[in-house]
Image: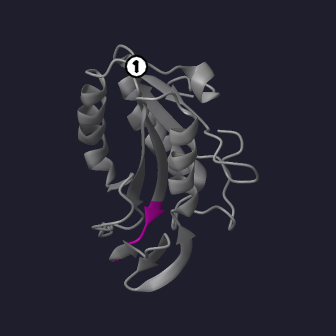
Amino acid sequence: MDGVMDSERRPLRPIGASVDEVNDRTGRMLAVFTRRPGVRLFGPVPAGAGQTPIPYAISKGPLVVLVDAVAWPAGTYSTTPDGNILCDGVYIGQSVRQLVGAVHRLRRTMPRGCLVEAVIVVHPSLPAAPTLPAAGPAELSWLPPADLPAHLRHRLSVAAYCQSDINAVTLSLSPVTPGS
């Protein structure tokens, strides 16, 4: 996961856990899907010039799901129209703008018929789980870790009915070896 670092400049940051811990937990969850035919796991994903890479992308057929992950304490999280993240109404210094921008850039550069979306997996950093945003950008889903497998199973099964396919060359990404 070279390039995915723990930094105050990182748009999405864990609170109460390190970036490595959160990405390791999420990566193990994603690696299970690589046993399915046609599913590929990539990472880290370039987000744009001078921006921190997004830890993972998982794909099947024409579908690419960018996956970022954080650990947050209990609270009620929401996003502002410009992408800032609030906890209990207070800005926490984080934003989804870079992730949403990466979705838009990939949509513009991918072949016609490809589907690009993003997921933020929110691991609880305390025993009490955070309340995730009920709304936000349409191309973005907020998920607790327990909901990630069902969400991906559904999205990847929908992709199986589409005709076009993508590959690592199209994405210009590096495959992730499960367990690494």
Residue annotated with mark 1: 164
Query: Is any atom of residue 154 visible in this view?
Result: yes
- Among all residues in the image, which is located at the extreme top? 37
Looking at the image, which is closer to me, 176 or 171?
171
Residue at the (44%, 78%) spot, across then down: 86
- Visible in this render: residue 175? no
Could you say where residue 124 lies in the image, as x and y percent from the top left? 37, 62
Q: Quadrant of the C terminus?
A: top right
| Residue drawn where x is 68% and y is 48% of the image | 48
The furthest residue to the right: 50
Q: Hey, which residue is sitting farthest front in the picture?
A: 112
Q: Position of residue 129 (x, y in %)?
A: 30, 66
Which contiguous range is marked in magenta? 71-75
Packing grade of label 1 (10 A; few <14, some 14-19, many >=20) is some
Q: Quadrant of residue 150?
A: top left
Q: Is residue 116 magenta?
A: no
**Please, what secondary structure does the residue beneath circle 1 have?**
loop
- Figure quadrant of the N terminus: top right
Query: What residue sits 47% from the left and 52% below the top?
Result: 69
Side (left or right) of 150 relative to 93: left
